[in-house]
Amino acid sequence: MESRDLIIDAGDEEISLALLEDKQLVELHKEKRSVRFSVGDIYLGKVKKIMPGLNAAFVNVGYEKDAFLHYFDLGPQFRTLHKYYESAIQKKGRPVPIHKFKREPDIDKDGKISDVLTNGQTVIVQITKEPISTKGPRLSSEISIAGRNLVIIPFSDKVSVSSKIENQEERNRLRTLVQSIKPDNYGVIIRTAAEGKKLSVIDAELRELISKWEGAFENLRKDIKSPRLFIGEMDRISTILRDMLNVTFNSIHVNDYTLFESIKKYIGEIAPEKEDIVRYYKGKLPIFDHFGVTRQIKSLFGRTVSFWHGAYLIIEHTEALHVIDVNSGNRSRSGTDQETSSLEVNLAAANEIARQLRLRDMGGIIVIDFIDMQSAEHRQLLFDRLKEAMEHDRAKHNILPLTKFGIMQITRQRVRPEMSINTEEKCPACRGTGKVKPTLLFTDEIQNKLAEIVEIVKTRKLQLNVHPFVAAYLKKGIFPVYLKWDLKYHICLKVQSVPSYHMLEYRFFDRYENEIDLS
């Protein structure tokens, strides 16, 4: 059975999340602690400009660029939503419960945005696509609030069940259950995680989601200014846990105790039986280094990605689309015939491409140039393999069969900026100048720094963190270099290899793991 591990590196300004499947890195998320305008956030926005030619409007939600709201994204019950908002800010006391509120007729499917919106109007909108490049957020007024098992849609009555729940009896059970407990004027989408859940669990979550929505309106009169955040989506960590936590989630490792407690509490609420999988990491190495994430990041985010027996991918990004070229490398020299060899490389490439799309969160149009194959059976086999490999991808996607030129086209939903990491490093020795100090003298530099620390700090127990190659040199032999330093300076020195360091980077730490910096 496939295992999943979540590694969380909490820094002062940024939190990084690495999702491993069978120890292979498949998703990487980075979130600023002060992140705004995430998918799912609900804002009070102000209509800035109506664009009749686009049948859309630009809305100010507080971002530096106005957000885009198309007429088709208003939702059929936009007038009801706006009417409820106006009644909530005008009426004294608590707003009328939504299940008692009289709905307005649906807006015209083929109508014009100028018939519904006016400049300066306050609207309730939800982020459906985060700001990307030069574009502001994409909005919708068809609001949905997601929980672990359910998604509620105010001012709707439809109950639908996730297509991933295949058992017809279970589908009917869940639909009947939800229809019996949901209030009027609420539509519900039953998520995959709800499969097998008891009535009490479903009912409790439904009440919680409704309370979250209606509670926001109760507090609305205290602050009716716009633009502002109306209902915030969970942070990225909670969202990933909510959407992905399942029986194959083996462990969650986090290096921040406060965050560890928060995650453990959250999992205790949504899945008490899995509370023990949350573990606090206390190791001395950076958490990504300890779990081998750093190494995978360095090898997977470059322009060239090796994946199998010398074969490799070339990944290029343009404004309009992404292009992936599959190369056989040394594989072409193997003893098998060309057609068989091409099939083997292409099948392996399909698995790696599916992984790369998730890892880099590549969206829009993706064009893949596979190695040419003559057999129609082999071409179909490749198509089926890529579809299978992308079944775990939560982003909506569409895959077209191979063209006669051996090109495959994919469209993949893009809701967030692409994950891009520059794996090229400035030369640590020359700092980009093209000239370096004699490397023969590098150990002398470390020794001089050590002598200075011993003299000034007056400590006898030290730790030296260096690149693994340098660590191997310092520990080499029966009587290694670092032991000679121990005897010379009457200290106890520990040499620790750190894969994320540059080749000539080194740092000293005291017995309390505080860095010693004399610069």
Image (cartoon, rainbow, N blue to C red):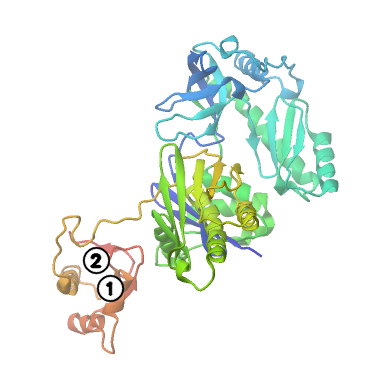
* Position in image of residue 162 (x %, y %): 73, 42
* Position in image of residue 69 (x %, y %): 53, 23
Q: Is residue 65 above or below residue 343?
A: above
Quarter in which the N terminus is drawn: bottom right
Residue on which disc 1 sits: 470
Task: Give amino acid for label 2.
Answer: Leu
Q: Residue furthest bottom?
A: 478
Decide if residue 371 is on the left or right side of residue 173: left
Specify the quadrant of the image occupied by residue 94. Answer: top right
Closer to the camera in the image, 308 or 327: 327
Numbered disc total: 2
Q: Is residue 449 above or below residue 373?
A: below
Q: Is residue 103 above or below residue 17?
A: above
Q: Is residue 308 visible?
A: yes
CB under 8 Å between callouts 2 and 1?
Answer: yes
* Position in image of residue 289 (x %, y %): 41, 64
Label 2 environment density (alpha carbons within 10 Å; few <14, some 14–19, many ≥20): some
Question: Which structural element holds mark 2?
Answer: loop
* Position in image of residue 96 (x %, y %): 71, 19
Residue on which disc 2 sits: 504
Specify the quadrant of the image occupied by residue 396. Answer: top right
The residue located at (35%, 62%) in the rendering is 500
Q: CA distance from mark 2 to mark 1?
A: 8 Å
Task: Give amino acid for label 1.
Answer: Val
The residue located at (67%, 53%) in the rendering is 271
Closer to the camera in the image, 476 or 364: 364
The residue located at (44%, 26%) in the rendering is 62
